[in-house]
Amino acid sequence: SFVFLNDEAGLTPEERSDAAKEEAQRALSAYWSALEGTIDPDKVTRAADNALIGNVEEVAAQMVERFHPEDRVMAWFDFFNHDSERVCRNMTAYMQRVVPLVETLLGRA
């Protein structure tokens, strides 16, 4: 699953959510444009529906809602993001903040 997580310092949860949605929109639009040569807004929307997008709390909630508790998720963080430091921060936030929150939401923590 594509993961567009924003847990950057200095932003409110709402700003993180908005920034993640904007990053996802840009990346998914570029993906479909490169793939087909034109942007189809419906395809971008469907791809965004399959991605995990938002701040820590939103991504955790989406995982609990969409996946079976025994599923394994292959998370793709560097989709069109060539800022390796940011990708590493996103992966760290995912493992240190999202995964424990998912475990809590599933009653495992």
Image (cartoon, rainbow, N blue to C red):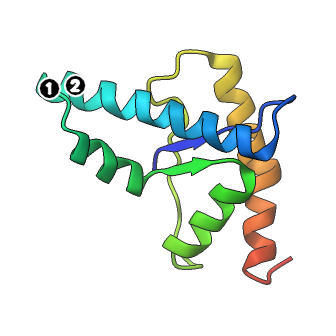
Q: CA distance from mark 2 to mark 1?
A: 5 Å
> In the drawing, what numbered circle is on residue 38?
1
Task: Report if the CB atoms under discs 2 and 1 are less than 8 Å apart.
Answer: yes
Q: Earlier in the sequence, mark 2 or mark 1?
A: 2
Q: In the figure, residue 4 lies in which quadrant?
A: top right
Label 2 SS: helix
The picture places residue 51, in percent across and down from the top left corner, at 45, 51
| 13 versus 27 height, above or below | below
Q: Residue furthest bottom?
A: 107
Disc 2 packing (10 Å; few <14; some 14–19; many ≥20): some
Q: Is residue 98 left or right of residue 109?
A: left
Quadrant of the snapshot with the C terminus: bottom right
Q: Is residue 48 above or below residue 105?
A: above
The kind of secondary structure element at disc 1 is: loop
Mark number, residue 33: 2
Q: Residue at x 81, y 62 (%)?
A: 100
Residue 93 at x, y percent in the picture: 77, 42
Q: Is residue 9 left or right of residue 83?
A: right
Q: Dot 1: few (<14), some (14–19), or many (≥20) neighbours within 10 Å?
A: few
Above or below — where is 13 with respect to 100? above
Quadrant hosting residue 63: bottom right
Numbered disc total: 2
Residue drawn at x 55%, y 74% is: 65
Name the kind of residue labelled 1 in the image. Thr
